[in-house]
Structure formats: C-alpha cells, structure tokens
Image: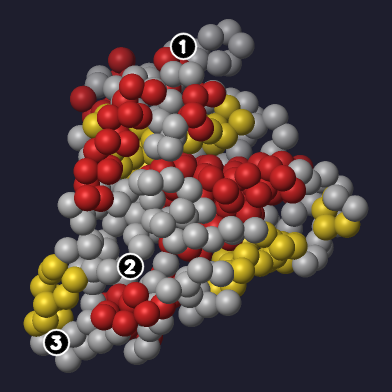
Amino acid sequence: MAGNSFGNLFKVSTFGESHGKAIGGVIDGCPSGITLDLAAIQKDLDRRKPGQSAIVTQRKEPDEVEFFSGIFEGKTTGTPIGFAIHNTNQKSKDYGHIKDSYRPSHADYVYDQKYGFRDYRGGGRSSARETASRVVAGAIAKQFLKGIEIQAFVSQVGNLKLNKDYRELDLSQIENNIVRCPDQVVASQMEDYIKAIKKEGDTIGGVITCVAKNVPIGLGEPVFDKLHAELGKAMLSINAVKGFEYGSGFDGVIMKGSEHNDQFNTDGTTKTNYSGGIQGGISNGMDIYFNVAFKPVATVIQGYETIDRQGNKVQAQGKGRHDPCVVPRAVPIVEAMTALVLADFTLINRAIKL
C-alpha cells in the first residue's frame, strides 16, 4: 500500500490499524534543538480522542503517545522522531456483521476491490483512527512554527450555521463547549441537534473553519506547489472530508473584480482579505482562512440494504461505537494538517535561501 507519507522536507509517515496493537508514525526532517512541550502534544491528542463527550464515539482510549527516538533531554535531535499510540479498547466483534458485506459510502467496497483483502475491524487502515498519528506530528510542527497561530473551530453542523466572520468571534471560547464552536448559543443548539441525530441512529455532517495568523510572506510556490493547493490536499486527505474552500471561496463568484480585489495599504497589507492570505499560490502575510466540509459518517446504526462479496443484495444494520458527527473531534486534525503544510513550506523556503 502506497500513500502513507505526507510532506517533502517536514515529513510524516504513519502506520497501524484501528483494531491492531498500535498506531503511530515517524517524523522525518524536523530540525534539531526545538524544545518540545510534551504536555501540549498530549493535550491535542486528548482533543481528538474518542469517548471525550456524549456526542462522540464512546470507544474509551487514553491515546497516550510514547516516543521512541528523535528527542533527548526535551529537545529534538534532528533525527527521525518515532512514536506510537497503543490501542487498548478494541471491540472487534462489533464488526463481525460486515465481514462479508459493505457499508454504503464507506471505503469497505473499494478497499476490497483494490487489494483483494481488507481488515474489516473498524475499517482497518481506512479508519479515522489513523489521524491520531497526524495530530502528534502536527503538534510538533506547531511548536516548530513559533509565532504562527493556528485555530480551527466548528462553524456548521447540518443546517445550523455560525453566520459570523471569524474576526467577530472570540476564538478563546472554542474549547469551552464539547462542539468546539466559539459561539456558546449556537454551540448549545448544535449539541442538542447532534444528540437528536444520535438518538435516531443516524449521522450528520458539518464544516470546520481554520484560521492561521502571523504567517510570513513567501510560503508556497507559484505553479504546481501553491500553498492553497497543498492545504487543499492536506484537508482532503482527512477521512470524511468532501470540500475545501479558502478566502472568499465559492461566494467569490457572485462578486465583480472591482469588489473582490484586495486593495493595498502602503505597508503591503490589504484593506480586505478575500484572497484568504494567499495570492498566486504564495502567502501574503494576511490571515489565512479556509473552510473544510465533512460528510455524515457512513456507519449508521440503522437497518440498510447493501451487497455482499458475491454481489448479492443483503440487509444489514450498523453496530458498534461511532461518531454521530465527526466535526468536534476533527478540529485538532485540521489544525495538525495545517501546521504540517506550513512547516514543510517553511523548511523549503530555508533551503531555497541557502
């Protein structure tokens, strides 16, 4: 299986399955001498881990990261950083009913067709549990990116939308509710809605907005390696993501060029920021902001029609512990992937200037 690595100079390769002994990864290219706050890394993992509230999967995993290499006396050594997160609460029997059939809109079918074999326990390698390894790598990338502030939050669940610009919000409130929405009133509505969806045995999608502040001018390349293209690739590699837009996004199509153009101030900043902090594929020093759309989780705890491995139509019903809405737990994943992209381009810029 290819495609287990992300990045060029700041690179992470991940391993493991949802119901295997452990998941983990190797971070290569992280510069030496970075003092790591291990508690901050664990905090990001805790924000992603299952079982943290009533509106997420009730799988109970401590998700404690164990580092094996690349760190000495609290600092990075410049050598590969190896780590693992042990699985402790697998209930593989919950997936016996899909051993020979496929969940609609899940990776089950295409995985089996591509490889001729699949680990049906929790989705195996295609499980979103793999993203815990990304969070570890992203948390280290954040600490490398001193001065750059990356914050993501839930801005929509189903039809419940936070109709405010991120600059109108108090982003310090993101972690003050289990939905991770910075507006407490809207967050309460979202929480009630997710609980109602869960009670129905169904799932719902949502949107995560991410903002990166204090990004220096010059990250990204003007042709194929555009900064927004790499951010899009990073976000679309996350399980259940169906869409990515930055800056004005799709709303920009209704504006005239004279309205959409970001007029310059004398210091090179711009009066507006419809560009989303990126022009010509290169960061311009303004805030980078984008939206990431997540589909409803494919596994529903309801009866449904599907096919088995022989192509016969069969009746099945979802079982086990699953998220009714993935976006509250995906917030730190979006932040992590953003940090990995920015760290990679930072090192590329350094290499160019040598």
Is 204 in front, or is 109?
204
Residue 41 in percent (x, y) is at 67, 48
Q: Label 3: few (<14), some or many (≥20) within 10 Å?
A: few
What residue is disc 3 on?
A: 311
Amino acid type of the residue that numbered disc 1 sits on in the rendered structure? Lys
Is 329 in front, or is 76?
329
What residue is disc 1 on?
A: 271
Q: Does label 1 or label 2 sit earlier along the sequence?
A: 1
Viewer can see residue 321: yes
Left or right of 8, for residue 163: left
Which one is in front in this view, the residue at disc 1 or the one at disc 3?
3
Residue 159 in percent (x, y) is at 20, 35
Kindly report the distance in space between the C-alpha atoms of the residues bearing marks 2 and 3: 24 Å
Amino acid type of the residue that numbered disc 3 sits on in the rendered structure? Gly
Q: Does label 1 or label 3 sit earlier along the sequence?
A: 1
Image quarter of residue 298: bottom left
Give the vertical position of 216 relative to 263 (above or below).
Answer: below
Residue drawn at point x = 11 percent, y = 77 percent? 315
Give SS at disc 3.
loop
Left or right of 67, for residue 8: left
Viewer can see residue 2: no
Residue drawn at point x = 25 percent, y = 21 percent? 255
Residue drawn at point x = 80 percent, y = 65 percent? 69
Q: Does label 2 or label 3 sit earlier along the sequence?
A: 3
Kindly report the distance in space between the C-alpha atoms of the residues bearing marks 1 and 3: 58 Å
What residue is disc 2 on?
A: 320
Q: Residue furthest top?
A: 266
- For the residues bearing labels 1 and 2, Cβ distance under 8 angstroms: no
Which one is in front in this view, the residue at disc 1 or the one at disc 2?
2
Give the vertical position of 266 relative to 336 (above or below).
Answer: above
Is 99 in front, or is 253?
99
